[in-house]
Image (spheres, rainbow, N blue to C red):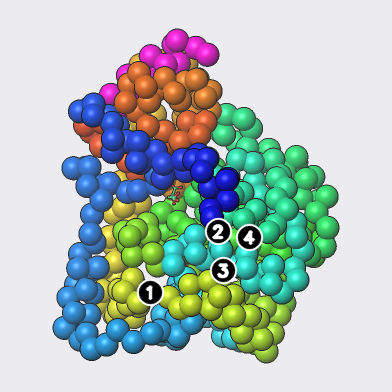
Amino acid sequence: MLPSFARVAAPPDPILGLAEAFRNDPRPNKVNLSAGVFVDETGKTPLLATVIEAERRLAEGAATKLYRPIDGELAYRELVRELVLGKDHEAVVSGRALATQTPGGTGGLRVAADLLRQTGASETLWMSEPTWPNHPAMFQAAGFRVRTYPYTDPAGRRIDEEPMLAALGQASPGDIVLLHGACHNPTGVDPSPQLWRRIGDLVEERRLLPLVDLAYQGFGDGLREDAAGLMELVRPGAELLVSTSFSKTFSLYSERVGAMLLIARSAADASAAQSHVKAAIRVNYSNPPAHGADIVRTILGDAELRPRWEVELAGMRSRIKGNRRAVVAALEARRVPGDWSGIATQRGMFALLGLSTHQVAQLRDGHGVYVVGKGRINVAGFTSANLDPFADALAAVVAAGG
Ligand code: LMR
């Protein structure tokens, strides 16, 4: 018999639940700015040309659907490790960094969580307020006690550095600190290089364990640029975990491809920890799906495809930056009260409008505009067709107050 709790419907997912509601909305001029999905000027999420070419090559060479190693193919794992940390990084060269293929960045976070819980890490995990809505739910489900550190001011415009560092100063040695490597979700506001250094110092002094969510490497300022904060944490002998995703940067959303990197004190430590990673995966999804990782491996490992992909990535990045400027111009042209200028210089797919629950409901119910939480918008979702309707709707909702 199912438990009685199962007869009570769970609330819809705060992000993917909106996509469902959007699909069911019959209004023709509805605007979807909810899930972080890149669209081109026609409103479509593109299949990258390098992905099409990699799939063509894979189809030609297809021979088997045999199980893959629990932690993924070695070639994929090595290419991803180099992409995240850089080929010549001491942690790569020494072998104290090891990558594991995971089903997307969410899968990477869950593998990291299970690894930590199953090897006796601290039960306490600190995350920014605000953060991606799935973070608290996921780490609670994995058995962590979640605590928050302040991040931005309530409007989501600038980082409250001192309160943030003061809160993290309360963490106990061994506690896990979840950090967004670049393109903070939901605010788009990233730490300055100076703040990253201070975070690195604090983590080292208090012997905390960073877990870096790097789902958007290359969507901010560039592949290496977006790893600069992470580099501040990968100090000699430092231990940390990183989760990365190729959903956005390769436009491979439905393939569920990502990775979890563990960086240990030494190669021997890393290899021991990797055996626990494999044990954690085996009791979860057993071993990873192949296709998405094969695509990423084919592109990253090919001298012709890799630079072509980097150009495609730069194209997506520059479109998002253009959208950022366009949305600020649209809001300023309508004199929507508030300072929106920061949106133009924030990074990645998201910006936070700092709206009330009522205003978010007004946008959706009154205007067919779907945004997440306190007004997180997917800036990568704007086109010339939906920008003006969005700006008109926001102007009306802000003017109405509440
Ligand atoms: C988002 O934040 O919208 C994306 O990361 C998609 C997701 O899985 O929530």
Tell me the crowding category of disc 4: few under 14, some 14 to 19, or many 20 or more residues within 10 angstroms, Cα based: some
Tag 3, which secondary structure? helix
Q: Is residue 313 above or below residue 4?
A: below
Q: Is residue 335 above or below residue 125?
A: above
In this rendering, would 97 be left or right of 399? Answer: right
Q: Which of the two residues, 50 or 122, is positioned nearer the viewer here?
A: 122
User: Which of the marked residues, 4 or 3, is nearer the chain's N terminus?
Assistant: 3
Question: What is the magenta range?
Answer: 387-402
Q: Is residue 352 above or below residue 203?
A: above
Residue highlighted by disc 2: 213
Residue highlighted by disc 1: 289
Residue that lies at the very extreme toward the top in this rendered image: 400
The three-letter amino acid code for the residue at tag 4 is Ala
Residue 15 lies, in percent from the top left, at 44, 42
Marking on residue 111: 3
User: Which of the marked residues, 2 or 4, is nearer the chain's N terminus?
Assistant: 4
Residue 317 lies, in percent from the top left, at 35, 51
Mark 3–mark 1 CB contact (< 8 Å): no
